[in-house]
């Protein structure tokens, strides 16, 4: 019998900025099926650039879906625990997709685009809501690793209700421009004042003449959102304009940033990472996302019965923030000890460049979750002292110091 041959590995996908990232000195690594830059000048330098100035990330691996149809918000409401009617056109919210057991299929941002011309390009400015040919639209930004499964599942749930689902990004570019200098940078490029655009607000802009090459005059979907704990924007553009904008930002001194800095920045801000803090086997109530669950909303949604029961009975475990006493780094999956006994595990951990301390997120029993509780993390066979602290570890504008 012939020896069985292993199936060929699936080739890694590349974003439109792959070559530009290499040219900028990016070190490329596999991530969620993509070949992405983990760092450029160095993780700490990129981290500090975002905290103190401005950095730009290529996040074109993430999925962007357009959901269109009459009553699209009502239809999506059946799949998420957050009240989508708390936002209106020009606003957005963070939420999660649930399965029947209340577990998290994915986390996502929902942008309410209001009513658009039925056949219009979603990147163009909105028409009058009195136009008889308009229809409702939502944009969803979803995780790269979940994009295919999310899209198939959303189609199975929503298309029978008359909702059209399309890939909004295509071969376009999605950038995250983050840091205290990000608003001024974007205002200069677009020639507009963004003071009236609140956090989680969004709009479509055209880049002004100050933008160079293919970026000049380009339409860009702008959301005042991000994953760093700083002010900033996520920008969706067509491929040529996106490439030109990336090059212009770097030429003007904005730091290119990779996945490494993105992870330390989000951890300092205590933002969840899918697959670490949450997954299909954990409910939002179990991982510190109870603020996304609006049980007072009198509408059914998948997994509601499980969340109602958990809300009534309480949670056995809690997600907490930990600061370690020494320089040892707690990594995902490391055991958490209480009085010498294993009681939980680290979900994410790193050295914090902003605080100069080792920090971690971990799931522990409710009784061990009180602020100030002394725990330990087992690292290479040694119990490293840790203490439960308030989240987030870092707040915008200042690194909160603790005794």
Image: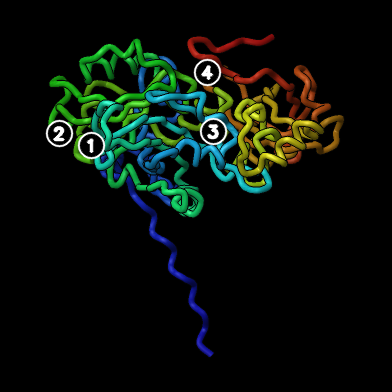
Query: Considering only vertical position in the picture, is 84 above or below 119?
Result: above
Q: Residue 291 at what x, y percent from top left?
A: 63, 25
Quarter holding the N terminus is bottom right
* Earlier sequence position, callout 4 versus callout 2: 2
Q: Which residue is mark 4?
A: 354
The spot of residue 290 in percent (x, y) is 66, 28
Binning the other alpha carbons within 10 Å of mark 2 as few (below 14), some (14 to 19) or many (20 upward) gives some
What residue did someone put label 3 on?
95
Q: Which mark is residue 243?
A: 1
Asked whether 101 or 6 is in front, the reply is 101
Q: Nearer the viewer, mark 1 or mark 3?
A: 3
Under circle 3, the secondary element is: strand
Question: Can the viewer see residue 252?
Answer: yes
In space, the residues marked 3 and 2 are separated at their CA atoms by 34 Å
Q: In percent of the image, x 51 and y 24: which residue is there?
A: 86
Cβ atoms under marks 1 and 2 closer than 8 Å:
yes
Query: Which scheme is used to colour this image of the protein?
Result: rainbow
* Mark 4, secondary structure of its residue: loop
Q: Earlier in the sequence, mark 3 or mark 4?
A: 3
Residues at marks 3 and 2 touching, judged by CB atoms closer than 8 Å: no
Tell me: 200 left or right of 374.
Answer: left
Q: Is residue 360 left or right of residue 308?
A: left
Q: Secondary structure at mark 2?
A: helix
Vertically, is 179 above or below 342? Answer: above
Please, is residue 400 above or below residue 215 in the view?
A: above
Query: In what element is the residue under mark 1?
Result: helix
Structural distance between the alpha carbons of marks 1 and 2: 8 Å
Look at mark 2 in the image and give the residue it sits on. Answer: 214
Left/right placement of residue 398 relative to residue 249 reads right
């Amino acid at each position: 019998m012939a020896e069985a041959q292993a199936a060929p590995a699936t080739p890694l996908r590349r974003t439109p900025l792959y070559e530009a990232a290499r040219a900028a000195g990016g070190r490329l690594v596999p991530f969620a099926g993509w070949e992405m830059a983990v760092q450029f000048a160095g993780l700490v330098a990129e981290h500090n650039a975002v905290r103190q100035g401005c950095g730009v990330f290529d996040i074109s691996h993430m999925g962007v879906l357009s959901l269109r149809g009459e009553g699209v918000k009502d239809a999506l409401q059946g799949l998420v625990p957050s009240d989508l009617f708390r936002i209106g056109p020009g606003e957005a919210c963070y939420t999660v997709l649930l399965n029947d057991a209340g577990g998290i299929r994915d986390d996502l941002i929902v942008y309410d685009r209001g009513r658009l011309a039925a056949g219009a390009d979603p990147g163009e400015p909105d028409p009058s809501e009195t136009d008889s040919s308009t229809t409702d639209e939502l944009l969803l930004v979803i995780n790269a690793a979940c994009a295919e499964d999310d899209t198939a599942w959303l189609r199975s749930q929503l298309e029978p209700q008359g909702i059209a689902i399309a890939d909004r990004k295509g071969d376009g570019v999605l950038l995250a421009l983050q840091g205290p200098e990000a608003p001024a940078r974007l205002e200069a490029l677009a020639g507009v004042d963004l003071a009236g655009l609140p956090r989680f607000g969004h709009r479509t802009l055209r880049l002004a003449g100050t933008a160079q090459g293919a970026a000049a005059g380009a339409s860009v979907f702008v959301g005042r959102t991000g994953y760093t704990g700083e002010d900033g924007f996520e920008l969706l553009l067509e491929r040529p304009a996106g490439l030109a904008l990336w090059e212009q930002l770097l030429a003007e001194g904005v730091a290119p940033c990779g996945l490494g800095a993105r992870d330390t920045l989000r951890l300092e801000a205590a933002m969840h990472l899918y697959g670490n803090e949450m997954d299909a086997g954990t409910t939002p109530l179990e991982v510190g996302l109870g603020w996304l669950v609006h049980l007072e909303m009198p509408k059914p949604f998948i997994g509601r019965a499980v969340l109602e029961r958990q809300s009534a009975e309480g949670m056995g475990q809690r997600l907490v923030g930990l600061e370690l006493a020494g320089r040892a780094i707690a990594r995902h999956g490391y055991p958490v000890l209480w009085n010498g006994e294993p009681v939980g595990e680290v979900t994410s951990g790193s050295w914090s460049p902003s605080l100069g301390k080792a920090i971690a997120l971990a799931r522990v029993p409710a009784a061990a979750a009180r602020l100030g509780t002394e725990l330990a993390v087992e690292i290479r066979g040694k119990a490293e002292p840790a203490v439960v602290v308030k989240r987030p570890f870092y707040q915008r504008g200042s690194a909160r110091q603790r005794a």
